[in-house]
Image: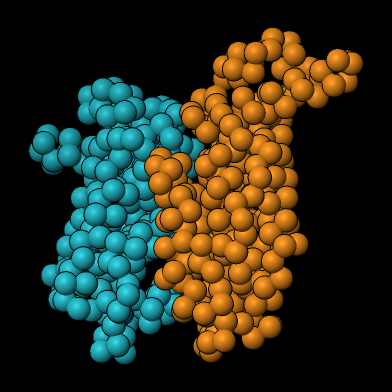
Chain colours: A orange, B cyan
Amino acid sequence: MVKQERAARTRRSLIGAAAEVFAEVGFVPASLGAISRRAGVSNGALHFHFANKSMLAEAVEAEAAERVRCVVEAVGARQGDPLQAVVDATHELMGALLRDVVVRGGFHLAGDIARRAESPLRQEWQRWVEDGLRRAARGGALAPGVAWDDAARLIVAATVGLEVLGGADGSWLSRQNVTRLWDLLLPRLAGRPYAGVLVSSGSLPPATHPHTG
Amino acid sequence: MVKQERAARTRRSLIGAAAEVFAEVGFVPASLGAISRRAGVSNGALHFHFANKSMLAEAVEAEAAERVRCVVEAVGARQGDPLQAVVDATHELMGALLRDVVVRGGFHLAGDIARRAESPLRQEWQRWVEDGLRRAARGGALAPGVAWDDAARLIVAATVGLEVLGGADGSWLSRQNVTRLWDLLLPRLAGRPYAGVLVSSGSLPPATHPHTG
């Protein structure tokens, strides 16, 4: 393995280990020693890649944001209906929170009082939901009297709630639980011609997940 | 002022100051020195009342749970319809999170990874919402096909989301925002004879708030 590859692999190990430790104990109590031990690298190697704990947190947040962006953009590419795309993306996001420790660590930091001002994750998710609902409204896909921004706020509140509750009890993030939530929301949010067509359980086959752990 | 009164007042100041500091920086980084300074008492006085930081967190959690219980029971006493009582209680809870630093600190600890296993607040709120929805279903007040436990999970997820998002941006907790959420949820959850009667903005006049700060 050439030197550059080894460095990239060490960096990935450190980001994964940091995400785990941040999700387990929070940002302030997390120790760099625990992170380098978990990654199986020396303290010196950690400091070669990251000058301090904040830079490690930034790397976890950036990597989590990138993974969420990939998941959400893949949904948008496969699903042309904006409301169904929001449904599908919530399933993908909750699945990623269950399976991918970097996404879990990134969202943990987004809720951590020491990091939340820095973290882009919840804001990006909110903007993406708003964008989907705005496009659904423009396409006439929302029920009469339903404002896109109210619908977006409800969806953001419910999904942030699932994310937070799922941190202590993973069953909140299950496909079944997310489907039941959409079974309640979709008949209210979708206009009549759409209501029977949209699929609460998501329209996509279970995706392949390159990042598990 | 007799000695006992003074001790009770010091204890209340310490709980209020601790709630503020926990909500501002989190449990682990909170220092007992910062809490005693904020309460305007000596370190010795703090240690007379609380042997350590965990006991102070327990006192904040217990006091917050007690205040939430009071709010919720007052709603139950004034409002006989169980679904309207859930609507009213969400308004009261969000109002308490905006105005009462002990409730805010208590819910912050409920989401703090160092304390959440200990904290009774979110579980109590969930049980209370479930109880209300179960009674609404028994009374035939839910729409056909709406399961009370699914409805309860959606309401718990959305309200925990509001609580968490409101920690960074208080506008999520506003009466207007909570009303819009119920404008979307009530027509879907309530059976036809009830849907037109229930009030999204809450059926109670703004309550008096003994605990502000």
Task: Give residue B129's quadrant in the image.
Answer: bottom left
| Residue B135 position (above or below residue A176) | below
The residue lying at 17 percent from left, 35 percent from top is B7
Q: Is residue A140 left or right of residue B124?
A: right
User: Of residues A183 and B61, which is closer to you in this image?
Assistant: A183
The N terminus of chain B - image quarter: top left
Res. B206 in view: no
Task: Give residue A1's quadrant in the image.
Answer: top right
| Residue B60 position (above or below residue A184) | above
| Residue B157 position (above or below residue B111) | below
The residue lying at 62 percent from left, 59 percent from top is A204
Q: Is residue A184 left or right of residue B197?
A: right
User: Of residues B70 and A192, which is closer to you in this image?
Assistant: A192
Total count of labels: 0
Res. A31 in view: yes
Give the image location of residue A35, x and y in percent. 61, 20
Task: Give residue B3's quadrant in the image.
Answer: top left
The C terminus of chain B - image quarter: bottom left
The residue lying at 30 percent from left, 23 percent from top is B52
Give the image location of residue A132, x and y in percent. 66, 70
| Residue A136 position (above or below residue B5) | below
Give the image location of residue B130, x and y in percent. 25, 60
The residue lying at 72 percent from left, 41 percent from top is A62
User: Of residues A27 and B208, which is closer to you in this image?
Assistant: A27
Give the image location of residue B106, x and y in percent. 34, 45
